[in-house]
Amino acid sequence: MQFRVPQFIEVEDRIFGPLTWKQFIYVAGGVGFFVMLYVLLPLFFAIILGGPMVAFALALAFYKVNDRPFIDVVESAVGYSMKGKLYLWKKEPKKTEMKPEEKLAGIAPYVPKVSENKLKDLAWELDIKESIYGDRSQQK
């Protein structure tokens, strides 16, 4: 027994002339909105208010971004703006820059006193020198 397998399942059927069902709904909605404004308002205000809506309806019907329908872009933009966002910040250590003449002379940058305890001062000074000059075993 043989079965027929559909070939072009991603292509929508053209129902209203050259328009698909979705395209027809978008265009009909935009034109209907413009006609409603035209009946209720003077022509100048109808064009000002209805023009962007007609342009948006035409974009929904015909415009594609990266071969994707414009409605997908609008849906993604609305979802992104409505969703909560998580901001992460990774603190990076501040690098001290030595002047070129200090690099040549081998002068370490000024290290302020941290505490009166000499053991803590010594440990802090060693940490600073290692971070400036790299690994101490490579200096020898």
Image: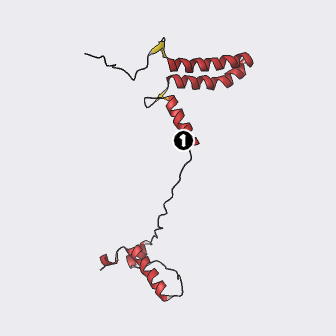
At a point 54% along the width and 84% down the height, the residue shown is 115
Residue tagged by mark 1?
A: 80
Q: Which of 99 and 28 is in front in this view?
A: 28
- Work out which quarter of the rendered image holds the C terminus and state it: bottom left
- In the image, taking residue 39 as reference, residue 129 lies left or right, namely left
Q: Looking at the image, how many numbered discs can be counted on the residues?
A: 1
On screen, residue 106 above or below 50: below
Q: Which of 22 and 46 is in front in this view?
A: 22
Q: Quadrant of residue 100?
A: bottom left
At a point 65% along the width and 20% down the height, the residue shown is 33
Return the residue found at the far front: 1
Q: Quadrant of residue 25?
A: top right
Scheme of image coloration: secondary structure
Q: Which amino acid does label 1 sit on?
A: Tyr
On screen, residue 132 above or below 52: below
On screen, residue 61 above or below 105: above
- Image x and y of residue 40, in percent: 74, 18
